[in-house]
Structures are given as C-alpha cells and as structure tokens.
Image (tube, grey):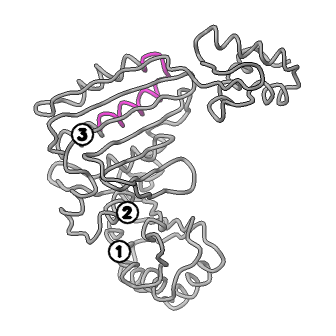
Amino acid sequence: MVDKDTMRRRALALIAEDGRGVARRLAAEFGLSRQVASGHLQALLRDKLVEAEGSTRARVYRLATVREAVRSYPREGLREDIVWQEAFAPALADLAENVRDIWRYGVTEMVNNAIEHSGSAQVHVGVRRNAVFTDGRVADDGEGIFLKIQRALGLYDPREAILELAKGKLTTDPEHHTGEGIFFASKVFDAFDIRSGRLYFMHGRGPLDMLMERPADAPGTLVLMRLANDSVRSLKSVFDEFAAPEEYTFAKTIVPVRLAQYEGEKLVSRSQARRLAQRCERFRHVVLDFAGVAEIGQAFADELFRVFAKAHPAVVLAPINMTEAVKQMVSRAQAGAG
C-alpha cells in the first residue's frame, strides 16, 4: 500500500505537470478509486498547498503560492548579500542546504551583474514558492545584457551575445569578473531564462538551449530561475563537471550549436564556424552539442574539425547528439585533419 506522503508528493507533481483530470490520473496510476484519489486532493486543498477551479470532473488544480516576496532596491550602493538576506533567504529557510546554496549562488551572482553592469536606477527582485518548486527573478531597467555584450565585443547581431554567454568565460569587465556567473547559474537551476530586448534565451535540464524572438522590445534585463524544492543537485557537482581533472579551473564548456543557426539559416559557411569557435581556445574540452541541428555544410565542418582543431591541438572538440548527416560531415572533416 502506498503511504500518504508518497501519494501527496505524486499528486502535487501531477498538478505541476497539468492541473486537469488529476483525480483520474492519480487513481489510474495507483489503482485507486476516483473517490479515494479525490480525498487526497481535498486534503491538499485543506492544507492550502493547492487551489482549484470548477467542479467534479471539470475541476482544474494549480499549485498554491506558499511564500512570496517582491522588492525593489536603488542600485547605487546596493549589496547582493543584503538582497539575499532580505528578499530570498526567509522564503527558503527550511529547504535543504544544497538547495539554499544553489539559490544563494544564483541570486547573488545575478544581482551583482545588475549592480555592476546594468546602469539601471533600480534592481527588482522576487521569489515565489509553492509545494513543488520555487521561482526567482532579478530584473533591471538598464541597457539590456545582449545589447551591452554586442556593443562591448563588437558583435554583428545581439543574438551572437547569447551564443557567447552560453559558452562561458565572458565578461565585459575582465579586471573584476571571471565571466563564470551566468554560465554556472544556467547549469545549476532546473530552468534558467534571460529576457532582454527582443530576445529570450532559455536553458533547462533537457538537451536543448532555446533562442526565441519576442514580439516587442522590453527594457532592461529579466533573469528567471526555477529549482525543485527537493532537488538533490549540489553546486560542487556542477562545478566539478566543468573543471579539469584534479584542478579547480573552469576548463570544459558545452556549446549549443543550434544557437549559431538563426531562423531560416543552415550552418554551411566558414564564417559561421568561426563565430561558433570564437573563444573556444580558452577551454581544454569543448562539447559541441548538435541537438536540433539536422545538417551542416562541408565548409562549416572543415573549419571546425580540421582548421580550428589543427590550430588548437590542446583543445578537445567532442561533438554529441549528431544526426547521421551531421556525423558524416564531421567524420569527413576529421579524416582530413589526420
């Protein structure tokens, strides 16, 4: 017999996925009657962990907000540790240490970015927690992160800034920053989104990074973070994944190749390959993730896997998630490098 806590956790997870037909889905999964399953949902309603609209079979459930805080701070003289202590820590105080550590890291890094790089008059933050996960946000009214990087690095298009951010080791102030904050924050959370101007970059725990265009310009930068309240992930495990063996250096990166492929384009030219490979020589191990890329051209493959590889023999290029068409082009280029 399934214990009550297991049933409650599963009911909450089902509601997080889709609030419709929850009683039916819960009953089918555990071999319960609809009446018994509905009883478990009623208990969650009484405990104010969920909310519901409609009646009987048409009822739709949603996770209730159990803790929430929204604050705005003048940027001048602001300290990220104060923002953490005042706005976020109280809402997360009873979660496991590894979860609090991830939130502390992500919040302080993103607030510090807003303080030192945005030029905004204010920094806006918010945290909203339910029974399954917590959402956090850090926003400013400044120039916008993608436009700032485009201007600082002399990039042709602000979309190129997203590709550079995804690689890591990118900062517009190398004297004071390592450029690791956004890279590692995007890896430790279940979901990590940056919205600025007309662009929207999404990184999740799945195989794809997504670049989307928004219907209209939005001022400043908005960073959204989400993490399961019972996550077993740790900061150390994520840092170790990208460190050189027996060292503490940031030596490995994962480059989502599809971010170099703008809508309507195919990856066929040497200039596209050079754009993708820019700054990759700063790493020892570069994973080129071809998820979402159906095919590449011969010149593109040759520039990466023969020309770049020959010019930087200390850098290991590791292509993954390749279609057969991509694999053939990569193999052909690698054979030419031999």
SS under mark 1: helix
Looking at the image, tell me whether mark 1 or mark 3 is earlier in sequence order. Answer: 3
Residue 211 is a magenta residue: no
Residue 173 as seen in the image, left or right of residue 58:
left
Q: CA distance from mark 1 to mark 2?
A: 9 Å
Image point (54%, 47%), residue name:
205
Name the magenta segment's main secondary structure. helix
Residue type for callout 2 = Leu
Q: Which tag, 1 or 2, sits closer to the chain's start?
A: 2
Which residue ends up furthest to the top in the rendered image? 46
* CB atoms of marks 3 and 2 within 8 Å: no
Residue under label 2, please give it: 163
Depth check, mark 1 against mark 3: the one in front is 3
Residue 97: give x, y in percent of width and height. Answer: 46, 24
Q: What span is in magenta?
A: 92-109
Q: Are marks 1 and 2 in contact (CB under 8 Å)?
A: yes
How far across and how far down the image is residue 261, in percent? Answer: 45, 71
Q: Which residue is mark 1?
A: 275
Given this view, does label 3 or label 2 mark the residue nearer the observer?
A: 3
Q: Secondary structure at mark 2?
A: helix
Q: Quadrant of residue 38?
A: top right
Return the residue nearer the eye: 225 or 335: 225
Judge the density around disc 3: few (<14), some (14-19), many (≥20) Cα neighbours within 10 Å: many
Give coordinates of residue 148: x percent, y percent.
Answer: 21, 56
Q: Secondary structure at mark 3?
A: strand
Which residue is at a point 25% across and 47% down the rendered structure image? 219
Residue 124 higher or lower than 52, as above or below? below
Quadrant in which residue 15 is drawn: top right
* Residue 140 circle label: 3
- Up-down relation of residue 218 to residue 231 (above or below): below
Please report the residue visible at 26 percent of the width from the left and 72 percent of the height from the top.
Answer: 156
